[in-house]
Image (cartoon, rainbow, N blue to C red):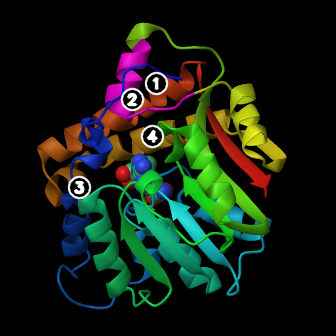
Amino acid sequence: MVSNMKNYNIKSMKLYNFVDRVYNELRELGKETSGQLSVNELSSFDQLHYHGTQAIDFAIKKFNINDKSKILEIGSGLGGPARYLAKKTGANITAVELQEDHNDAAVYLTKRCNLDSKVEHICGDFLKLGFPENNYTIVVSWLALYHIPDRKKLLNNCLNLLKPNGHFYVEDFAFFKPFDDNEKLELSNDFFANYLVSLSQYETDLKVAGFSNIFIEDMTSSWIKFTRDRHKNYQDNIDRHTRVHNKIIVQNMLYFYSFAMRYLSGGKLAGIRVSAKK
Ligand SMILES: C[S@@+](CC[C@H](N)C(=O)[O-])C[C@H]1O[C@@H](n2cnc3c(N)ncnc32)[C@H](O)[C@@H]1O
């Protein structure tokens, strides 16, 4: 595990501090409080993972997600992946998000995209909520599971909620080499990391929970490039971002983008895509 101290303050991670960014971007679109929104015009700011909607397209293709699919998403953030899945495939999605301000923004955006009949947003800690068992064709998550400390309970819940032969598909973090104490502290504070293990331990956890057909793909080099480009683009457009948001938001975003880039490039943090079957 990344550390034996638990971080109870998710807002110590700067990405999560300024949900106002969403409303600032709507103002910039000229649609602050009214007007139909499209999924595409939100995608530059509502996808809080790497490679934006391309990452969701990968999952759609791999698992043939379609209008018969029943999806549970863990850690749905601003709802970007859930809305994209619903719009592109017609699937039904239950999107679970811990942070109230993010969930409120997600509900608001989903309604304004007219996707509220397909996407149900639920606010709370996935580990503490109850969902119907044997009910979902796929459980998905993009960059949220490493936030959740109790992996055993998390995986047991996922297994129980899936239909027989259902799929588990996540993008997440792990480590190539263990972190020192200072790194653990930084990852806990700035990344809200509560469960980071080696790739082999990641696989063992899934096996022990009862999953089969486990496949872990190393995404680190692709994510290093993504985080470098993201940081550079943000810096290149700093005047635009300062005008749309403000200096404090811009400083926080740059701090967070630089942190993610530094850790992924550092040789210890691993970015992974994981699939498994019930
Ligand atoms: C990096 S964000 C990714 C959001 C979304 N998956 C996306 O790709 O746009 C991870 C999200 O997981 C949420 N999260 C963390 N722990 C959670 C928990 N125990 N239950 C539900 N959501 C959680 C965080 O609040 C955060 O919004």
Q: CA distance from mark 3 to mark 2?
A: 22 Å
Proximity of marks 3 and 1: CB atoms separated by less than 8 Å: no
Q: Amino acid at mark 4?
A: His
Instruction: Tell me which label, 4 or 3, sits earlier in the chain.
Output: 4
Quick check: can you spot residue 48?
Answer: no
Q: CA distance from mark 4 to mark 3?
A: 31 Å
Front tag of 3 and 1: 1
**Residue 219's image quarter?**
top right
Which label number is shown at residue 147?
4
**Label pair 2/1, CB-CB below 8 angstroms:** yes
Frontmost residue, 267 versus 251 = 267
Name the N-terminal-most of marks 3 and 2.
Answer: 3
Disc 4 CB within 8 Å of nearest ligand 1 atom: yes
Residue that carries the numbered disc 2 in the rendered image: 259
Q: Which mark is residue 240?
A: 3
Residue receiving disc 1: 262
Magenta stretch: give its range.
183-196
Q: Is residue 199 visible?
A: yes
Determine the residue positioned at 55% across, 83% down: 87
Task: For mark 1, give the secondary structure.
Answer: helix
Residue 192: percent from left, percent from top: 38, 35
Which residue type carries mark 2?
A: Phe
Lower sequence index among marks 2 and 4:
4
- The residue sitting at the right extreme is 213
The earlier-in-sequence mark between 3 and 1 is 3
